[in-house]
Image (tube, rainbow, N blue to C red):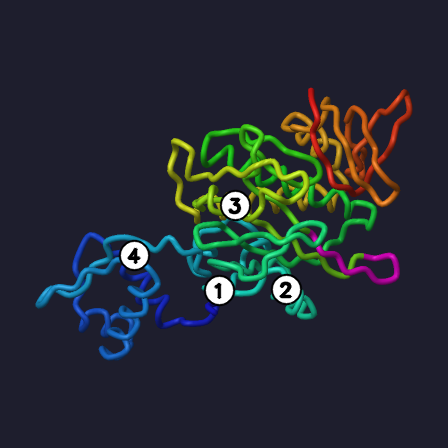
Amino acid sequence: MYNSFDSPGLVKVLTFLQTHNTEYLSGQDLSDVLRISRVAIWKHIKKIQELGYTVESKQKLGYKLISNSDLLLPWEITSGLKTEVIGQQAYYFDSIESTQIQALKMIKDENKNGAIIVAAEQTGGKGRIGRKWISPKGGLWFSIILYPKFDISITTLFPIASALALSIAIEKTFEIKPELKWPNDLTIKGKKIAGMLVDVSLESNKIESLVLGTGINFDVNVKEIEKTLKKIPNFYGLASLSEQKKKIKPIELIQSFLIELEKIYKSLENRQTGKIISEWTKRSATIGKIVELNTINGKIKGKATRIDNDGALVVSENKKNHRVIAGDIMHLSK
């Protein structure tokens, strides 16, 4: 595991290489400037290379950074991130059972507000309704710890608002406009590109903590994953952002999402839900469709007309409106 406040020596060496990437830097120069022994400099550079950075080494010249890592390492996430809280602490795991499970272990420490836990792969990722989330390397798998000040009634709107934030971030970086499938999926041409999962801890009718889990099919083998998922009820296909024409680094999308999420999070704390609902509806793949929902009270089939202030989906069936807070949904037609 790496975090955003450990490995100060490594980060010092890396930052210096990044800010002087047009020239070679000798081990002695790095040692003198950074006040780190030459042996430590060498060890840090070896580790930097292991983490996916390309560092060229030439005798009598020294070291030169050629390219950055594609890994979502903590110092890359926090570097230049224009947020106040969300994403200002970061943790990275090469492989972990689930970032959501790890985040839930960390929530008792309120100093972790806004912390993001990232994994290159998950061995036991989970989706909504206890479903397995296939999380191989190439995807973006992460969870964010929050201690909200908004009212408990807004909890059910939060995953919808978070999906909107991700949609805006993808639109700004990839210049494409994903659609939003109620309650918390993002789709491209009708296929799933990302999903959200929220775990909330309540005490005395108050939100104690909230963990947002996010999975994005960034650069994954869609056909391979579909072999495992195609037999799951209501499975409607997968897409990967790597299929898009514009090529974006993972760090660009993550930082953009964290910025958009913080904006929307503040809006929720100020109870400014109207604009969120309006923007979500504009991007919705669900509103106006004939849908079928499996709920705890049985099946509902009708036309999805809107979402309420709490994120509930309103479905019209035989001139009767149903409010659905949670359920498994299938789009049947326009």
Secondary structure beneath dot 2 equals: helix
Corner quadrant of residue 284: top right
User: Is 203 a magenta residue?
Assistant: yes
Lower sequence index among marks 1 and 4? 4
Secondary structure beneath dot 3 equals: helix
Mark 1 vs mark 4, foreground winner is: 1
Left or right relative to 15: residue 171: right
Q: CA distance from mark 2 to mark 1?
A: 13 Å
Lower sequence index among marks 4 and 3? 4
Q: CA distance from mark 4 to mark 3?
A: 41 Å
The residue drawn where x is 74% and y is 37% is 272
The residue drawn where x is 73% and y is 54% is 148
Quadrant containing the C terminus is top right
The percent coordinates of residue 210 (x first, y second) are: 71, 57
Corner quadrant of residue 276: top right
Q: CA distance from mark 1 to mark 4?
A: 27 Å
Lower sequence index among marks 2 and 1? 1
The residue drawn where x is 72% and y is 24% is 289
Residue carrying label 1? 95
Left or right relative to 77: residue 291: right
Residue carrying label 2? 101
The percent coordinates of residue 295 (x first, y second) are: 82, 42
Q: CA distance from mark 3 to mark 2?
A: 26 Å
* Few, some or many residues within 10 Å of mark 1 (<14, 14–19, 20+): some
Residue carrying label 3? 227
Q: Amino acid at mark 3?
A: Lys
Lower sequence index among marks 4 and 2? 4
Residue carrying label 4? 18
Lower sequence index among marks 1 and 3? 1
